[in-house]
Amino acid sequence: MLRTSCAIVLLAGLAFTARAEEALAEGKDFVYVCKDGGNGAYEAFPDVCRIKDGRLLAVFYDGWTHVSLPTADKPSGGRVTGVFSEDEGKTWGKPFVIYDGPNDDRDPSVVQLSDGRILCDFFSLKTGPDGKGYVGLGSWVVESGDAGKTWSAARALCNEDYYCSSPIRELPDGMLILGLYAEKNGDGYGASTTSKDGGKTWTPVVNIPNGGKRLDAETDIIRLTDGRLYAAQRSPNESMRSSISTDNGATWSTSEDMGFQGHCPYLHRAPGGAVLCAFRWHSKNGTYLCVSADECKTWSAPILVDNFIGAYPSMVSLKDGSVLIIYYEEGGGSNIRARKFNVKGAGVEWLPFP
């Protein structure tokens, strides 16, 4: 459906299960990225990147509930909001509006390209026929050429059948690729689209074969060291699925089992070279991550990040070689949280905030 404490964590099941029973301390184990974006105090679906001036930019869904469709009191529905950090994620500034269209604009992701432009992609929902439910309006992008001070009008990325949940990725040759997903005629699958002109135009969408298993997908893509592309995709109730492209997204292999359950996968290469996959583990009611030291061939056991099921995590490397992960809580008054860690072999070392 449209979906809406510094210690080395060992990978034994008892270790990460026991950790779930401990409460994290604000200001030590985690910090808040945002508690109230100004549009109803429900913050969700965050993403983060570093921009060229050194600051971190986090973007997130800013509404009053999980799907904030327009109302008489709030005629523009949920919106996309941003916030900056000037101190490597220890503290975060005042929220500002990135995009607030006439519908429910949600699940934003953000990247700064090598030419300095910042691209923020998201998708939109409108109220359904006769005022019941909602209808998808596809994926959109806005851009900023002045480090986030001003933003362009929104333009469509693809047709209305496809949705985004992860950032646009820039490849070494300057080509852009974006993971997508679709649900149609009872089936669900991942997909991708590419741009060779800096995001001005995008190729027709390429579907990723799902191997006969319906996928909610929420596709994210990372480039491997040998040049291939790896796509991680959400499965409704089984293990997540992965696919490989050897031709920059022109074609994809049939999706295969990743070996662990998860929703909303986010892929990040840590400073030491390991690939991280963060996700929501719905049946365990928490936010987790896995580590791969062999270019996504195998993964560590899931490592607990926090006892909140919201997830839709994102990661960014910090200047000291650690990694910052942000995610959301879910439920009334949901907030955006951040933790930081070092990768230690097949595990992580959680780092306190001063």
Image (cartoon, grey):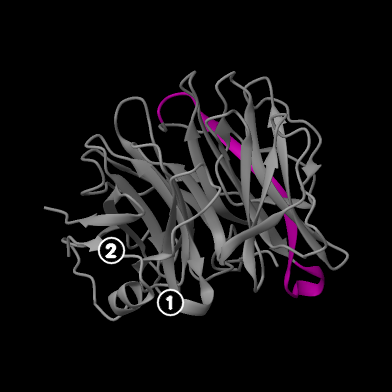
Please name the amino acid that badge 1 sits on. Gly
C-alpha separation, residue under disc 1 versus residue under disc 2? 30 Å
Placement of 176 over or under 340, stated as above or below: above
* Residue 69 image point, x, y percent: 62, 66
What residue do we see at 17% from left, 65% from top? 5
* Residue 243 image point, x, y percent: 68, 47
Quarter assignment of residue 70: bottom right
Give the magenta range: 128-147
Whether residue 53 is visible to the viewer of this picture, yes or no, is yes
Which residue carries the number 1 mark?
332
Mark 2 residue element: strand
Mark 1 residue element: loop
* Residue 6 image point, x, y percent: 17, 60
What residue do we see at 65% from left, 71% from top? 238
Which residue carries the number 2 mark?
9
Quarter assignment of residue 169: top right
* Residue 160 image point, x, y percent: 78, 50
Front-most of residues 236 and 72: 236
Total number of numbered discs in the rendering: 2
Please name the amino acid that badge 2 sits on. Val
Quarter assignment of residue 273: top left
Placement of 179 over or under 351, stated as above or below: above
Placement of 212 over or under 163, stated as above or below: below
Q: For this view, does 33 lie left or right of residue 46?
A: left
Whether residue 82 is visible to the viewer of this picture, yes or no, is no
Q: Are marks 1 and 2 in contact (CB under 8 Å)?
A: no
Q: Specify the quadrant that holds the N terminus.
A: bottom right
Q: For this view, does 9 lie left or right of residue 100?
A: left
Q: Between label 1 and label 2, give the one nearer the viewer.
A: 2
